[in-house]
Every structure is written in structure tokens, then in C-alpha cells.
Image: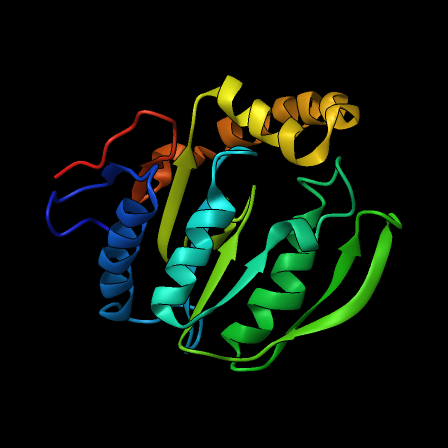
Amino acid sequence: MDDPLTGGAAAAAAPAADQGRALARRLAALVAGSEPLLGPVRLVCIDGPAGSGKTTFAALLGAELGAQVVHVDDLLAGWGDLEGVWPRLRDGLLAPLGAGLTGRYRRYDWVAQEFAEVHEVPVAEVLVLEGCGSARRGVDPCAVLKVWVEAPPAERLARGIARDGEAMRAHWLAWAQDEAAHFAAEGTRERADVIVDSGVGAALEP
């Protein structure tokens, strides 16, 4: 989706809550005015490296749209599953919704390290899909908006360790390598409609 104000992919920074909400309102209006591409559903994908602020921005945009937010982390089979998650997303969620049917997925329990209960995703006007790998090339035919959220690597790592604990540092570093290879192969940032900078000190563009 080209931004109507710029004629191309829009770049903005949204470090503060007020700025993030303003950007979410703007994007929600664009999504609401678009034609659905996933059957009757307008699919919005929010991608970017771990610790960049995707979940926070997805919550803001989901609230503006009144839409369910599905987190890719809930479908991953652990740390090394960035590529393996796609068939579960495609076959369990996107394909049924595209056919006007309820989507389903089993939530992965990161503590027990196994898949747990089944969650249903009903057909709705909008679905927000958030997480690393959500905006891979496979969604191009069915996504009305692809958002890339970023922040400096050191800041993202610090956020992750603060959230998950020092014991997870090795996992975070290995994941960073996996996601960098994935994003390079998929051209995720280059294909995004909107780029959001959540880094400290960033300022929202006019």
C-alpha cells in the first residue's frame, strides 16, 4: 500500500505513546479504506527484528481498528522455528480466512516447550498479524498493509534481556542471526509500506 501523502513507502518514528497512537490512527484510516485481499479480511502485517516494538505498535493499531492481533511468537515451535512457522500460518490461519472460514492455531507454551491449547480466529473485517516473519513474501497477495518496526540493535538487545533475563542472551544472539538472514532473503524492510522507528530519541515526521 503506497502512502497517499508521499506516493511511496512512508517512514515515521513513534517512540512516544502519543506519537504512536497518532500514527496508528492514520494507518487505521488507510486500512479501513482499502479493499480486502484475504477473502473478506483486510490483513495487516507488522514485522521487524526482535525487541523493536512490534507488539506495542500492533496493540495500538489493533485497538484503533477494533481488530484481533495474532502474535507469530504464539505459533513458533521455539527459538529456531522462524522458517518452520510459515506452513502453520499459511495453512491454519491464512488459507481458511481467505476462504471465509475460521482460522485456528495451537499456542506454543514457551515454558513447557510444547504446543498447548487451540485458538480460533474468526473471519473479521481486519486481522493484525504481528511478529518476526509475518510480512514474508508469501503474504504479498493478501496483505493490505505491511509495517516494518525498527530500533538500533543494541537497544533492541537491551530490551530483550530486560524482559527475558540474562539467561536468554545466547538465544537472543542466535535469533538475531536467524532473523537477519530471513529479512535479507525476504527483503522485508524493502517491501514494507510503512517504516516505524521506535528507537530512543526518534521523532515523528510531520
Instruction: Check the image and tell me how it is coloured.
Output: rainbow
Tell me: 136 left or right of 84.
left
Tell me residue 20's x, y (percent): 32, 47
Q: Is residue 51 visible?
A: yes
The residue lying furthest to the top in this view is 154
Residue closer to the observer: 68 or 162: 162
Tell me residue 47's x, y (percent): 47, 43
Residue 199 vertical placement versus 144 (above, below): above
Task: Count the numbered circles shown.
Answer: 0
Residue occupying the point 56% across, 41% down: 132
Residue closer to the observer: 143 or 32: 32
Tell me: 127 left or right of 19.
right
Residue 152: name its quadrant.
top left
Residue 60: name its quadrant.
bottom left
Tell me residue 202's x, y (percent): 29, 28
Residue occupying the point 69% across, 49% down: 85
Tell me residue 25's x, y (percent): 26, 59
Residue 162 vertical placement versus 196 (above, below): above
> Could you tell me which quadrant the C terminus lies in?
top left
Q: Is residue 142 visible?
A: no
Residue occupying the point 17% across, 36% down: 205
Tell me: 80 left or right of 190.
right
Residue 12 vertical placement versus 85 (above, below): above
Residue occupying the point 56% across, 66% down: 94
